[in-house]
Amino acid sequence: MTSAAGRVPTRPAVRFPNAKYGEGGVILILSDRRDEAVEMVLAGLRRRRAPVTWWDPGDFPARGHLTVTFGDGGHRLVLDPGTGETPLDLAEVRAVWRRRPNPPTPAANVTDPSHRRHVVSQARFLLDGAWELTSARWMPARGETERRAHNKIVHMAHAVALGFRVPETVYTNDPRELVPAHGRAGGRLVAKQIDSAEFTLDGADHRAYTTVVTRRHLTSRHRLGHEPVILQPYVPKAVELRVIVVGERVFAAEIDSQASRTAKDDWRHYDDDRVRYGAHRLPGDVERRCADLVTSLGLSYGAIDLILTPEGEYVFLEINPNGAWGFVEQRAGLPVADAIADWLATAGTGEGR
Amino acid sequence: MSDFATALESGVRLLRGLPRRRAHVEEARRAAAGWALEHPDLRAQLVVDERPGTPVVDFDLLVEDPRGGTVALTVQTEDGVPWLVDHSTHWAAGQLVSVDDVHLSVAQALTMIKSLSRRDTTPHDEIVDQCLILNEVADETEPVPTEDLQAAADEFRRGRGLYDRATTLAWLAEMGMTPERFETYIGGVARRRAFRRRKEAELGAARLAADPRAFDLVRAVWITGRENGVAAHTGDLARAADGGLAALAAAGDVETTIAERPALDLPEPLRDMAPGETVGPVPYGGAFLAGTVLARHEAREDERTLAAAGRAAFSEWLAARRARATIEWHWS
């Protein structure tokens, strides 16, 4: 996220091929203009000669304009990216890829903080309404659906209902829950954040990765009262899995984090010399369940984290509706970018569901 | 309340007041030592638990129970810091350096140090250079050709005296690497070597064309040492072709080098000199140098010259890339 003052100069919106929308209409990509994942997918869209507009809502309302007009029993939604190009009638949009859009940003010369907050709130309201009325298919989903699916409590309930095995999990801010959870886990308990959020300690950026709870942690149990956490027994790993679902296509990458002392508790510590990434073949029922989970949450894309235990059981940890897939393509060789391009390009053609 | 209970309460007060930061541990130790002097019968000792990756520390106070045994006191005050925040780690904990998009872990750096080979630079600079190249190859997905892998593995093993399977396996065990991980690691080394080769080939011809004189093949003799010694033997250089070399070879107070190299690879004072010219003594690399050029042949676009131009161009490209990079050492 960048402030108005700190934003890099915005590149013009990408638009190709020019003017002709083709049979199915335009693909609208909502994301930061430095998003490398979008670049990876654009190649596939170019090959399919799919018309694309790449726009960052972070340019709105400072540069771009959005107009919704009601009249004659209908409505019209027009997006002018503010780059001198032809405004886009959102009725022409067949698919929207909501990747990593920045929040609305006021113009730099709107300086009063209360005015800036006001601009953001008004702009967000209009954007939410316009997207609701844009009758394209969305990846992964409209913002509200994505936010609901991102909630760990919500998606874990869906996973359990679909038959995924999940660790005994406690979401709580009750300090009295900590010691019993530690005891039930036989002293092998991990704690996680309910949602990833930035914070600092002594002014330096800190992270709360998956934390193996020691007896020392128990002595500060009262701190749990300040914010909820997730408590789970430590699940032994043969490998960790990142499963990417695109529509109904499922790609699984295994992460051999156990080869690294640095990454064995949380592969996001990255130790690329020692951690091996590779393609993984999921059992049919697990693969089906992954696709069903994404569908049941109203999504068309999801990044699911699983653990494969040494006993061969697949254990569900969480789903991120907009989770990273670049490393799955680059390190495990799985063609996720092409699958996303395919899903977007076949919107409105009756294919690629 | 018993004396022991009173002392325990006092111990709790002590612990509540100790600063829970690594930078203030000595202050905490002094406070605890003072408290211990006030309670000599308890034989109190402060245990400092320094957590990795964070400035936060914890304390335990061990005291002797008058009825026998040890009592351990620990205190966590209500300071309003949430539990996971208190137990968090610095975002770069476990990482040594970040160079643009590459974050090098301590484990990776330790392995990388084993493969550093350049003598003309510091390990710090070479690690940064390797990270710059890692940035360049980050998006490469095609497999490394088998012959490149083999060449990289052979070079790596030769450089460490790992001439047979047993010594290689022992080295891997010492490094905490499985043979499979070693293969992956060598894949990375091979990819970086291949990038360097490609870049040298891409830039070499243009570098040569831009400054062909820098790649003239030059035969030169030079001596280095203390100023007096170099000055005393400069005359021998002037008559190098007429017995001077023999005199230099016998000189014990200077180091003599005779070499034929592309001009750019010679000591800087000699690079532009014509045959028969002599220079020195001049300050050079912390000592003094004098030298003469015996022969100079115009650069030809042959394999050796192009390779030298490629190496020079790559070094310059790397220096420019380094100047643009964002470099952050996390432990300095």
Image (cartoon, coloured by chain):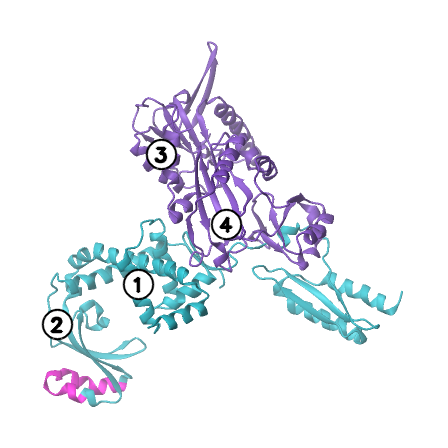
Chain colours: A purple, B cyan
Distance from the alpha carbon under mark 2 to that under mark 4: 66 Å
Image depth: mark 2 or mark 4 in front: 4
Residue A59, by quadrant, is top left
Image depth: mark 3 or mark 2 in front: 3
Query: Does the magenta-highlighted stretch encompass residue B236?
Result: yes
Q: Name the secondary structure under disc 1.
A: helix
Image depth: mark 3 or mark 4 in front: 4
Which residue of the protein is positioned furthest toward the top in this rendering?
A72
**Toward the viewer: A67 or A98?**
A98
Distance from the alpha carbon under mark 1 to that under mark 3: 44 Å
Q: In this view, does B32 lie above or below B189?
A: below
| Residue ID at (66%, 51%) | B83
Question: Crowding at label 1, few (<14), some or many (≥20) Cα neighbours within 10 Å?
Answer: many
Q: Name the secondary structure under disc 2.
A: loop
Q: Which residue is disc 1 drawn over?
A: B152
Distance from the alpha carbon under mark 1 to that under mark 4: 30 Å
Marks 1, 4 in one chain:
no
Lateral position of residue B101 relative to residue B78, left or right: left
Identity, as a three-letter code, of the amino acid under mark 1: Ala
Q: Which residue is disc 3 drawn over?
A: A12
| Residue ID at (73%, 62%) | B74
Distance from the alpha carbon under mark 3 to that under mark 4: 40 Å
Residues at badges 1 and 4 in contact (C-beta under 8 Å)?
Answer: no
Q: Indicate the chain on which mark 3 is placed.
A: A
Identity, as a three-letter code, of the amino acid under mark 4: Glu
Q: Which residue is disc 2 drawn over?
A: B274
| Residue ID at (53%, 40%) | A319
Question: Crowding at label 2, few (<14), some or many (≥20) Cα neighbours within 10 Å?
Answer: some
Q: Which residue is disc 4 drawn over?
A: A240
Counting the numbered discs, the total is 4
Lateral position of residue A331 relative to residue B299, left or right: right
Question: Crowding at label 4, few (<14), some or many (≥20) Cα neighbours within 10 Å?
Answer: many
